[in-house]
Image (cartoon, grey):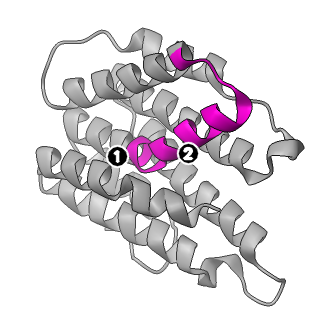
Amino acid sequence: MVERSSYDESRMLGTIAALSRQAKTAFAAASAEHLWPVVVRYAAAASLSGQTVDTLRDGLDQTWRVAHGESEDVSRVASFAEASVPEEDEALGPVSGYAQNAIAAIAYAARTWTTDSAQEAVWSARQVYEAADLAAHYAGDGRIHPDDSDVVHAALSLLHADLEAASAGRLVELERQARAGALEFAQLLK
């Protein structure tokens, strides 16, 4: 299992590799769900089309559905998300970086299903950690190490809870907790 106080991809990979394809995908989708509100925030700041936002949301929803055993073709979800990852825009501050992480997480979640790869799920989780790390850097004054920040601790706690739920096969609960806590987590990404 992954510790709440540290980010260790190799330990996470070992835990996720033992999961079913559905559980891996749900874990990866939860990571994307935690970051969803920053896609909406980015869309408003960058004038991203409503159609693009709707297609990304639908893609994440499709990924959840396959994780719950429904038959969906999510192969196009990853391609669309990859093509939608924004370039860094310094004028938007960190929001473009958060959007990069959020949209990449959607692509990784869909690819987790299509490849049954634990590594893709880990890369989805990495997006949550990297967004938190970016927020810590923007909020920090140079005296605090990013790993000691509240936002990084929140990200680690989310990932730990997600992995626990996925490992226990509580996939409906995992989706519910990811959706319920997404706005709260995204508010930490200032």
Q: Quadrant of residue 1?
A: bottom left
Extent of the magenta region = 31-50
Q: Residues within 10 Å of mark 1 (few under 14, many from 20)?
A: many
Residue 38's mark? 2
Q: Secondary structure at mark 1?
A: helix
Q: Is residue 44 magenta?
A: yes
Q: How many marks?
A: 2
Say which residue appears at 14% left-offset and 19% top-offset: 70
Say which residue appears at 37% left-offset and 28% top-offset: 60
The residue lying toward the viewer, choosing from 171 and 189, is 189
The single residue placed furthest to the bottom in the displayed view is 143
**In the image: residue 85, left or right of residue 158:** right
Residue 142: percent from the left, percent from the top?
A: 84, 83
Q: Quadrant of residue 96?
A: top right
**In the image: residue 8, left or right of residue 110:** right
The answer to whether one can see residue 9 in this image is no
Q: Main secondary structure of the magenta part?
A: helix
Residue 101's mark? none
Residue 176: percent from the left, percent from the top?
A: 20, 49
Q: Of the residues shown, which amino acid type is indicated by label 1?
A: Ala
Q: Secondary structure at mark 2?
A: helix
